[in-house]
Amino acid sequence: SQQGEEDPQALSIQEGENATMNCSYKTSINNLQWYRQNSGRGLVHLILIRSNEREKHSGRLRVTLDTSKKSSSLLITASRAADTASYFCATAGSGNTGKLIFGQGTTLQVKP
Amino acid sequence: AAGVIQSPRHLIKEKRETATLKCYPIPRHDTVYWYQQGPGQDPQFLISFYEKMQSDKGSIPDRFSAQQFSDYHSELNMSSLELGDSALYFCASCLRGNNSPLHFGNGTRLTVT
């Protein structure tokens, strides 16, 4: 990966449980974003957290950012079978091109 | 709402052939990005354009080139195709500015045989 590691690489849970995915990155960032990808489809933007923010919520999603550890976590609460997908973190560097560097992704399976 | 349109959806080519992938960004978006995603891999940044000028370059092979046209659509041209070029190719667009999320198309699946 150009960016860093995501942990775990694969996660299997039951519907209703919470899912936590972690992401580490290597460089200084402007913001960190999480994307979801269904198999063979495009990436869908979920949530963006700026480098000066520590936590952000959007519906059942909660994202944290620790710039001192260069890490982020995505929590999906009360998971549903429809949440089954791959989840990627991506960082935007301090330059102004808006280019995103993606982590390796976590494959989440939510069993009904 | 209009999304990013990519064509073709699937493309099969033989080694050493050429391929052209097209991307139509969301209207009024001024920045286009191209990514390559191999099987089970994360998307790798190839190249980006802002206002029809190349703005950033990543791990794009010399055999590939891209441009953005006056109507803001972009094309990725790939020559001397190799088996390893088989991948999903995504285009994304945004309205440039700090903290702008990228909007991705559904990709072109290129298979080189």
Image (tube, coloured by chain):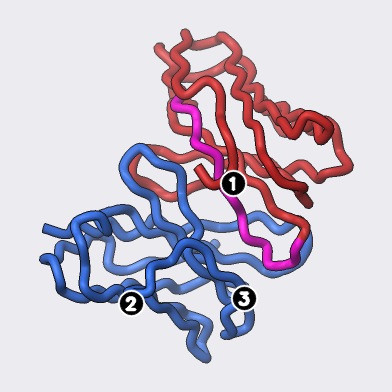
Chain colours: A red, B blue
Give the chain of mark 1: A
> Residue A34: horizontal and vertical position, in percent?
62, 39
> Residue A17: horizontal and vertical position, in percent?
56, 9
- Near-viewer residue (A3 or B98): A3
Where disc 3 sits, the SS reads strand
- Magenta-highlighted residues: A95-107
Q: Residues within 10 Å of mark 3 (few under 14, many from 20)?
A: some
Q: CA distance from mark 1 to mark 2?
A: 27 Å
Q: Residues within 10 Å of mark 1 (few under 14, many from 20)?
A: some
Which quadrant, please, contains the C terminus of chain A?
top left
Residue where numbered disc 2 is placed: B77
Name the residue type under label 2.
Asn
- Near-viewer residue (A62 or B16): B16
Q: Quadrant of residue A85?
A: top left
Please report whichever mark, 2 or 3, sits nearer to the chain's N-terminal start. 3
Report the residue at 31% width, 60% height from top.
Answer: B108
Residue A45's label in the rendered image is 1
Q: Are marks 2 and 3 in contact (CB under 8 Å)?
A: no
Residue where numbered disc 3 is placed: B55
